[in-house]
Image (tube, rainbow, N blue to C red):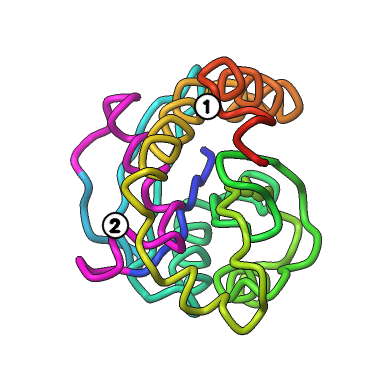
């Protein structure tokens, strides 16, 4: 079994925040792959789904971002899921909006959710980095990530989450490079390519 984790903060006031794009990705993953109803477990909400030929547990921690690792650790221990089989979806300031990159391990770049998961579980899990752009100055980061996507941004957010869900069988089967490439090509085809970065 694999564990896909979407990071965000629980509650209606955070639902549209840039920091919650990981939650949005998991909600779309559950919808596209016809997951069972969400239920409360492991200090979060979980659902089981088959993606491609793989069984996957989708998890959205409800611990707030800086304690995400507690929920991930509980779920991983219960199902005996290895660190290499955990995939974390999170917002990434260092990528332009609508871009996505995947990597194994690495630094946490000041991301409290990643820091918590690394502290509780170890560092060598896969990260799906969902670009939200940068406000331009580090003092503006806190307010930026905790503000909602604008009406104009929601279209690419929806397209990115849908594309990730559509291509998820590649991710589930360990074809990370192909998954990244297919998502990139599909987003370019929808008009979210280089022209949108300028």
> Disc 2 versus disc 1: distance between alpha carbons?
20 Å
Q: At 56% from the left edge and 24% from the top edge, which residue is drawn?
A: 187
Residue closest to the far front: 198
Residue 2 occupies which quadrant of the picture? Answer: top right
Report x, y in % for residue 140. Answer: 56, 78
Is the stretch drawn in magenta largely helix, strand or loop? helix
Report the span colored magenta: 10-37
Q: At 41% from the left edge and 72% from the top edge, which residue is drawn?
A: 146
Report x, y in % for residue 105. Answer: 77, 56
- Look at the picture and state if 192 lies above or below 189: below
Q: At 27% from the left edge and 25% from the top edge, which residue is drawn?
A: 34
Q: Is residue 44 left or right of residue 73?
A: left
Residue annotated with mark 1: 168
Res 12 label: none
Few, some or many C-alpha atoms within 10 Å of disc 1 (few <14, some 14-19, many ≥20)?
A: many
Report x, y in % for residue 131. Answer: 60, 49
N-term mark: 2 or 1: 2
Secondary structure under badge 2? strand
State the residue in front, 138 or 78: 138
Residue annotated with mark 2: 45
Residue 157 occupies which quadrant of the picture? Answer: top left
């Amino acid at each position: 079994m694999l564990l896909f984790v979407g990071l965000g903060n629980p509650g209606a006031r955070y639902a549209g925040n840039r920091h919650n794009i990981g939650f949005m990705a998991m909600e779309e993953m559950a919808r596209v792959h016809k997951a069972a109803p969400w239920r409360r477990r492991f200090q979060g909400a979980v659902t089981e789904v088959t993606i491609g030929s793989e069984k996957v547990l989708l998890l959205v921690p409800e611990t707030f971002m800086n304690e995400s690792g507690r929920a991930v650790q509980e779920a991983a221990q219960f199902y005996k899921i290895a660190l290499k089989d955990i995939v974390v979806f999170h917002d990434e300031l260092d990528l332009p909006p609508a871009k996505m990159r995947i990597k194994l391990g690495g630094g946490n770049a000041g991301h409290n959710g990643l820091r918590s998961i690394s502290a509780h579980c170890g560092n060598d899990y896969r990260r799906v980095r969902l670009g939200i752009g940068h406000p331009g100055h580090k003092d503006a980061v806190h307010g930026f990530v905790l503000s909602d996507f604008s009406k104009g941004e929601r279209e690419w957010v929806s397209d990115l989450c849908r594309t990730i869900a559509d291509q998820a069988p590649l991710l589930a089967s360990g074809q990370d490079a192909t998954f990244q490439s297919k998502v990139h090509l599909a987003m370019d085809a929808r008009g979210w390519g280089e022209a949108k970065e300028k």
